[in-house]
Image (tube, coloured by chain):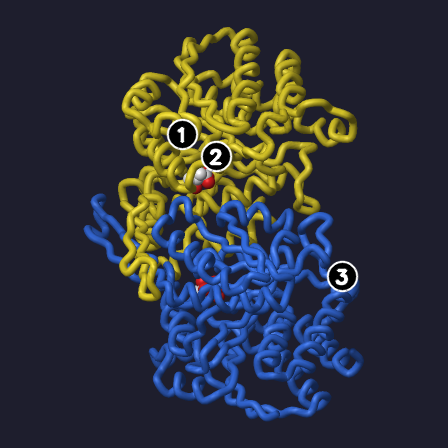
Chain colours: A yellow, B blue
Amino acid sequence: GHHRLAVIPGDGIGPEVTDAALAVLDAAEQRFGFSTERTTVSLGADRYLESGELLPDEAVAELRSNDAILFGAIGSPKVTPGILEHGVILAMRAAMTQAVNLRPVRLYPGVPTPIAGLTPQRCDLVVVRENSEGAYVGRGSTVHRGTPAAVAVQESVNTWYAAHRAVDFSFRLAQQRRKKLTLCHKTNVLVEAGRLWLSVVEELSAQYPDVETDYVHVDAMCMHLPTTPERFDVVVTDNLFGDIVTDLGAVLAGGLGVAASGNLNLDGSGTSMFEPIHGSAPDIAGRGWANPAGAVLSLALALGTLGEGEAAAAVEAAAASVLSELPALAGEAMGATTEVVGQRIVDRLGEV
Amino acid sequence: GHHRLAVIPGDGIGPEVTDAALAVLDAAEQRFGFSTERTTVSLGADRYLESGELLPDEAVAELRSNDAILFGAIGSPKVTPGILEHGVILAMRAAMTQAVNLRPVRLYPGVPTPIAGLTPQRCDLVVVRENSEGAYVGRGSTVHRGTPAAVAVQESVNTWYAAHRAVDFSFRLAQQRRKKLTLCHKTNVLVEAGRLWLSVVEELSAQYPDVETDYVHVDAMCMHLPTTPERFDVVVTDNLFGDIVTDLGAVLAGGLGVAASGNLNLDGSGTSMFEPIHGSAPDIAGRGWANPAGAVLSLALALGTLGEGEAAAAVEAAAASVLSELPALAGEAMGATTEVVGQRIVDRLGEV
Ligand SMILES: CC(C)[C@H](C(=O)O)[C@@H](O)C(=O)O
Ligand SMILES: CC(C)[C@H](C(=O)O)[C@@H](O)C(=O)O
């Protein structure tokens, strides 16, 4: 097939890891006989600092006209925190109706994990994070700001519509996996939002009788995840809890360098976007130290949704294979991580 | 001295671990020459199921007339989730103006941790959780409940008053420790609440120039905590994030059986309450399997605030010493954990 791909390299290490992923894509195209037409869209700190632009209409139009988006990372210490997050990342998730954020937590064989005794067999789950609302609506207000009487109210808005969309997707994903779905929330304290999520899971579970459902509070999740990840297959949760538990999940699976994600549009009204979960890491930018595996594994997720299943599986397998060699390589003078790891994945792709 | 102590054994394993802690208290009184007058206050699932009572006025009056409260755990599968949490636990924190929840994350030597290579030297921090507001105000509303148009709005209310109280306490605590204070929040998304917390830290840091301050997003905290806990000394955070990160902290320090906490009243308007962070664990209640160390270490925190510093240190040391033996004991036929561990701590108290 032929696919239109928008590429947002972004800031810091974003362009470095994106380049590595695109080299892997070149190799995958050759090997599996598909092609992509790639358009670079520059968004992020540099563009904002130069022009004041965050997510201009023409960028949205460009992104929308593509079949998938590869995203590196954005952010810079020169920009006030919150501006790029709201103005670009969250704005893009909204503009492209990226309804869920898919975050696999998978420990590949040979990848060092800080959890003692954890094995790949025990760590293979997927978190489906609701990606459009909750506390991320960014609504709230402060009265008496800057005085001892100040009160800041922050709102979390939770619709049946978006919860249903995320939970339904999660049930279908669970059907293709080990048929277990766990809702993660804090229903005993966030009673209004919790009741909504519980009712959606209950309602939909009747439609998916082959999927077993379970419920775990977010605090308990942070205990279970590092110690008994085998309890979980698909975990569905709200936007804020998803943000938190997937960073913990990334620890299990070997750290930020490895974790991939997909911001998925589910109804054809926008374009899905794939990104490593690490940030722009300005402190190490330009040194070639960044591990491109997160970006390459995000590419694999992208290829899967583009219908290139064979290429997706091969890219994932090649990345996993190279990751298993890193601990040994790290002992030697390995050279620039980004390049060496990227090139090895390219080479491995010819072999898997 | 002489101290009035209210004891709330609660449900499930609550009474078992509380009994063990009270036996340790008996021994500490003998050894260090102080006395307590103890009043049992029955609150929790049993009382609620029998009488419909959650936190009656006379219970509040009784608790208020004491110098400290020892709390076991409450909760039962027979009670709808949310009822006891709001009606007893959160109501008590509010009625007693328990402004902060102090949660040490300390790995004692010899205690098994699931984090590979983690050492006690690297894991000694305290989380100060704001304990009166944020998402825990339990305010919100749902429109169109039970229909596809349902919207649940959940509010987080954050006052300068409560944030200032928690942050000021945290600065003073940091001064007595390694002089580093980290604010944990999600300021890039929860902009209103985040700005409030940041401004309070900034304002107070001028009053505590000897304390270094730092900021970490809650998602990043879930990465740093398991991998580089040595980064942290005192961590101050809001109610919901504190709930989440302290459960993760408990994992590092050896699990639920070990973690202690203090719900502290800071202005004399109420009574501080000390509790293990584990729940009532109805599935193992009555079997003697519960580790009483969390309850005993909570007792040590209580003794510290009652001015019995020597006894507090000895109880902590005795509990730590016995905890270091547990991995070896677990290999043998150890007998009932609660009793054996409790008795060993009592015995050890004579030796430390
Ligand atoms: C940068 C930030 C807004 C973002 C989020 O909180 O969603 C990031 O942490 C993520 O997880 O993608
Ligand atoms: C039981 C629940 C309301 C409580 C909380 O969320 O504060 C518990 O998890 C805790 O951490 O003390």
- Mark 3 → mark 1, Cα distance in angstroms: 52 Å
With respect to residue B139, does B218 lie above or below? Answer: above
Task: Specify the amino acid type for callout 1.
Answer: Leu
Q: Are marks 3 and 1 on the same chain?
A: no
Judged from the image, the secondary structure of the residue bearing numbered disc 2 is loop
Which residue is the site of mark 2? A76
Q: Chain of mark 1?
A: A
Q: Secondary structure at mark 1?
A: helix
Q: Residue at x 35, y 48 (%)?
A: A135
* Mark 1 Cα-neighbour bin, 10 Å: few <14, some 14–19, many ≥20: few
> Which label number is shown at residue B110?
3
Amino acid tagged 2: Ser
Q: Residue at x 43, y 54 (%)?
A: B198
Q: Would you name the residue on which mark 1 appears?
A: A49
Is residue A210 among what the camera can see? no
Q: Real-space Cα distance between discs 2 and 1? A: 10 Å
Quadrant in which the N terminus of chain A appears? top left
Does any portion of residue A125 appear in the rendered image? Answer: yes
Q: Nearer the viewer, residue A20 or A296?
A: A20
Residue A318, quarter of the rendered image: top right
Mark 3, Cα crowd under 10 Å, few <14 / some 14-19 / many 20+, is some
Instruction: Look at the numbered discs 2 and 1 and tell me whether their residues touch, using CB distance below 8 Å.
Output: yes
